[in-house]
Image (cartoon, rainbow, N blue to C red):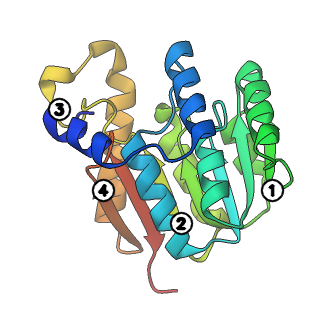
């Protein structure tokens, strides 16, 4: 957590208990295997927001072990398409989805997210982006094309471990990713065609929808 003080993060995590034993075990597995999944506060926000939005179709870029797909499937009745590059993580994700009886509503695609969305002709009410951060600009351009009227795009980790906001946290080997993320943020906030909000939740959650529809 890089957007709030550690004591606030600890308080919020204690305030929002893990309500489901299976998700709790998934989170423990992710921590042990060092697989990145959504922050607990992002999870809580996402579940709440989707319960209000009530999307019928969801696209997710970056499945990992299926944690966020599980959260979204539980919060909605939507049909979910999720894309994961790592075949081993995809196998774990399929197992977790099957164990929760969610496989009928979640279509897991193994492949490169950028390649998938370039060819995809689907349309989605909600798009959750949590794949390669250096490709966020590419993802956004294509996802805006795939977004339904009144649809919403959610991009996680846009502050990139706090590096965009703090020079003290900056790592030189990540300079290309940081530059691309900064450029993307500048572009969307300057756009007259988009409504944009950057939330200081987790490592930064960017919400985007089109205007004048």
Front residue of this view, candidates 18 and 201: 18
Residue 128 position in % (x across, y down) = 56, 52
Marked residue nearer the N-terminal end (2 or 1): 2
- Residue indicated by mark 1: 105
Instruction: Tell me the tag on residue 198.
Output: 4
- Residue indicated by mark 3: 6
- Residue indicated by mark 2: 50
Marked residue nearer the N-terminal end (1 or 3): 3
Report the number of numbered marks.
Answer: 4
Marked residue nearer the N-terminal end (3 or 4): 3
Residue 171 position in % (x across, y down) = 27, 16
Instruction: Tell me the tag on residue 72.
Output: none
Q: Nearer the viewer, mark 3 or mark 4?
A: 3
Marked residue nearer the N-terminal end (1 or 4): 1
Q: Nearer the viewer, mark 1 or mark 4?
A: 1
* Label 2 – label 1 distance at C-alpha: 16 Å
Could you tell me which residue is drawn at 47 percent across and 56 percent down? 46
Position of residue 158 relative to residue 120, above or below, is: above
């Amino acid at each position: 957590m890089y957007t709030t003080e550690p004591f606030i993060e600890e308080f919020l995590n204690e305030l929002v208990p893990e309500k489901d034993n299976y998700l709790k075990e998934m989170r423990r597995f992710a921590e042990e295997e060092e697989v990145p999944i959504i922050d607990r506060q992002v999870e809580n926000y996402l579940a709440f927001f989707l319960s209000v939005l009530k999307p019928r179709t969801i696209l997710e870029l970056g499945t990992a072990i299926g944690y966020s797909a599980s959260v979204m499937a539980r919060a909605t009745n939507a049909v979910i398409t999720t894309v994961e590059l790592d075949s081993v993580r995809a196998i774990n994700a399929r197992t977790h989805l099957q164990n929760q009886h969610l496989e009928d509503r979640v279509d897991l695609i193994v492949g490169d997210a950028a390649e998938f969305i370039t060819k995809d002709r689907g349309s989605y009410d909600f798009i959750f982006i949590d794949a390669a951060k250096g490709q966020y600009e590419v993802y956004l351009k294509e996802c805006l094309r795939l977004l339904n009227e009144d649809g919403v795009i959610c991009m996680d980790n846009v502050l990139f471990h706090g590096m965009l906001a703090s020079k003290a946290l900056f790592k030189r080997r990540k300079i290309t990713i940081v530059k691309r993320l900064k450029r993307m943020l500048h572009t969307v906030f300057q756009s007259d065609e988009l409504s944009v909000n950057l939330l200081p939740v987790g490592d930064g959650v960017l919400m985007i929808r089109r205007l004048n529809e």
